[in-house]
Amino acid sequence: MKKHYFFVITAIAVAATTVWPTLRAQETAPFSQMNLALKFSTMGAGLELATPLGSYLNMRAGADMLPLSSQGYDNYSLNSYSDDLEPAFGFTPEYRAKGKIQMIHGHLLADIYPTSRSIFHLTVGAYVGTSQIKIQGSIVDPKNNAQAELLEGYEWPDLNIDGYEVTTKDGRANLDLLLGNAVKPYLGIGLGRAVTRKSFGVKFELGVLYQGDYTLKQDGRILNLKNTDEIEGEDISLINDYAKWIKWWPMLNLQFSFRLY
């Protein structure tokens, strides 16, 4: 029996002295390599630096920017205001608006791999920056979409947009829709490595980023929700049209990595 124990202990010792150095040799030392990536994603175009923290973990840091405008203007009915607006304009006008998304973020992410040679990974981290939609809107003549002209003796009306009382100045009602917090947590999965063994690599990623609730501003002033009985006219469903799909922002990312050293 003692011989069996001695044999097992000897085998373990031999394995430890032969296999362990091999495994250690396969490990990637932290910051031993650096890659530069060109990214194209639903966060915009961007640049990113990546370095290993080990065989199973890569760290990525970079910046992204997305300027995106809607294809055209949308018209919103003001028929619920017709009793007040028709005498002021000679007809019932409409509210015409379009949005422009501006997203500028930095990010710090970690790719976690199940094995040292796996290309599948889980990504966790956060994006830090601003997401906003600038809404340009005006009161127009529905026949030709030209800005409506107010008749003498009348004042420009306030509008009820998704429960917010929005003022119009010279027929215009521009708004800033700020999306969520400055820090936005992110979770995703992907294929490929940001830190490549070769000089060039391709990586694909799919995930979701939580931006949070929105804040609505007009002329730098935060607007608060009003009770429905405090505002004349029915809601113009405008803000929710933009905000409902941007609170949980989907991530699709394709990037091309180049090894620096």
Image (cartoon, grey):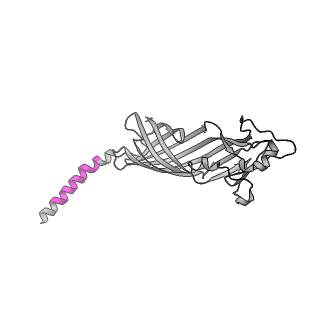
Of 126 and 33, the residue lying toward us? 126
Residue 111 as seen in the image, left or right of residue 70: left
Tell me which corner region of the image, top left, top right, bottom left or bottom right, holds residue 193: top left
Quadrant showing the N terminus: bottom left
Image check: 67 left or right of 226? left
As drawn, 16 above or below 66: below
Q: What is the x, y in percent for residue 197? A: 37, 38
Residue numbers of the magenta segment:
7-22
In the rendered view, would you say 207 is above or below 72?
below
Left/right placement of residue 86 relative to residue 68 reads: right
Residue 11 is one of the magenta-drawn residues: yes
- Tell me residue 77's x, y (percent): 69, 45
Magenta: main secondary structure equals: helix
Q: Position of residue 234 (x, y in %)?
A: 70, 53
Q: Is residue 5 magenta?
A: no
- Residue 201 lies, with reference to residue 115, above or below; the image says above
| 10 on left or right of 94 | left
* Residue at the (72%, 36%) spot, across then down: 143
Residue drawn at x 49%, y 37% is 39
Residue 41 point in image, percent of width and height: 50, 40
Picture residue at 67% right of the left edge, 44% below the top: 76
